[in-house]
Image (cartoon, rainbow, N blue to C red):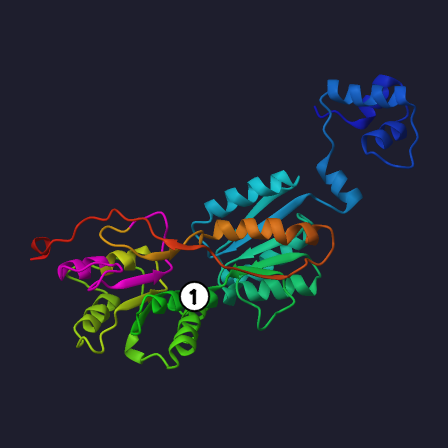
Amino acid sequence: MRVTQRDIAKKLNLSASLVAGVLNNRPNVWASEENRKRILQAAKELNYHPNAAAQALRSGKTNVVASVFFESPGHQAIVESLAEQLAAMGYDLLVVVINDQDQCLNHMHHLLSRSACDAIILWGPEQITEQPAILLEKERFPFVVKGHFEENHPNWCQVDFDHVSMMEHTVEYLISLGHGKIAYIGYEHDLVYEKKLLEGFRRGVRTCLGEEVRNEFILSGNDELSSLENPTDIERSVERLLELPESVRPTAFAMGTGIRTWHLIERLLAKRGMKIGWDRGDIALAGTGSWEFPLLYGEGYMYKDTDLAHLGGVIVRRLLPALLRGESPESNIILSLPEFAPHPTFGLPVKRSHME
């Protein structure tokens, strides 16, 4: 049976109001030092724990932050990072997963009506999270949204990677190595971050080379593994570019995809006795990928810490403390620029005999 404040008062033969005042640390309740020690000692001996719901009702605080995922599989790493960092602040994490887009606003209304948390973090594609964020803004409820809303909602607390700057820097780096013919490989899902990456690539080429990107140098596809029997659009497009005359053939690729595409290009190059790298005759690659999986044959430059768990840490450290105090953060828009570094590689030798 749960021990109550009244149980402690009865045991010590003290008034319930005095015990409640001491245990709730009320500033206007006076107790002698002796009685204060007796009350705290009895609470410890009886294994008393305050009623969280009652505390929340009195203080207006739950000490809980909700993380709401919309159509976002694979969020375990984000949850683990958020829970650990919030615990260090004295907060618990409530995880909510909403798969039915048509019912997302109903779910959000239900979450608010329960007064279940002090702030909400929204995760998912911008076209899904925008309406829930508009609802939270209307209700004046503290929230942070992962995504790019800096143009349409500059007042929102929001976090994402600086995809435009990432690709601009990629282009600058490749040009600094002497590459003037650079192609771009991205996804075809039409998500906001994909558009931002392509925007950054175009801007980088325009700024550094003073020209517009040739349409045939913009390649896109999905993230599915191809096979010899069913090559992807990207594989066919890369092969087509490699067949161009040397005078117009790209010597470098700015990557806006994951590591699978890097490995696909490694395979295509290996067929020709070539590799990703910086030596004469190599094809240079730089951009986004996945740091956990090394290259097989060559060398490339890739952004580190581009997983969403990293953004979760940014949210907890730089935005939530102010929001939970009822204040405005120093900066409500945070675009994170990851570290750009040489990617791990096995450095396996490429031999023509392997590809014949």
Left or right: residue 31 versus residue 206 is: right
* In magenta segment, residue 79: no
At horizontal 50% and vertical 67% (from top left) the residue drawn is 127
Question: Which residue of the protein is positioned furthest toward the bottom in this rendering?
Answer: 211
Q: Residue 332: name its quadrant.
A: bottom right
At horizontal 73% and vertical 34% (from top left) the residue drawn is 51
Does residue 224 appear in the picture of this structure? no
Q: Which residue is mark 1?
A: 169
User: What secondary structure is the stretch in magenta mostly built from?
Assistant: loop
- Residue 14 point in image, percent of width and height: 90, 22
Question: Would you place residue 22 above or below residue 299 in this image?
Answer: above
Q: Residue 327: name its quadrant.
A: bottom right
Left or right: residue 303 versus residue 221 is: right
Does residue 144 appear in the picture of this structure? yes
Looking at the rendered structure, the kind of residue marked 1 is His
- Residue 96 point in image, percent of width and height: 55, 49
Magenta stretch: give its range: 266-294
Question: Camera-side residue: 121 or 260?
Answer: 260
Left or right: residue 106 versus residue 235 is: right
- Residue 79 point in image, percent of width and height: 51, 45
- Residue 217 point in image, percent of width and height: 29, 75
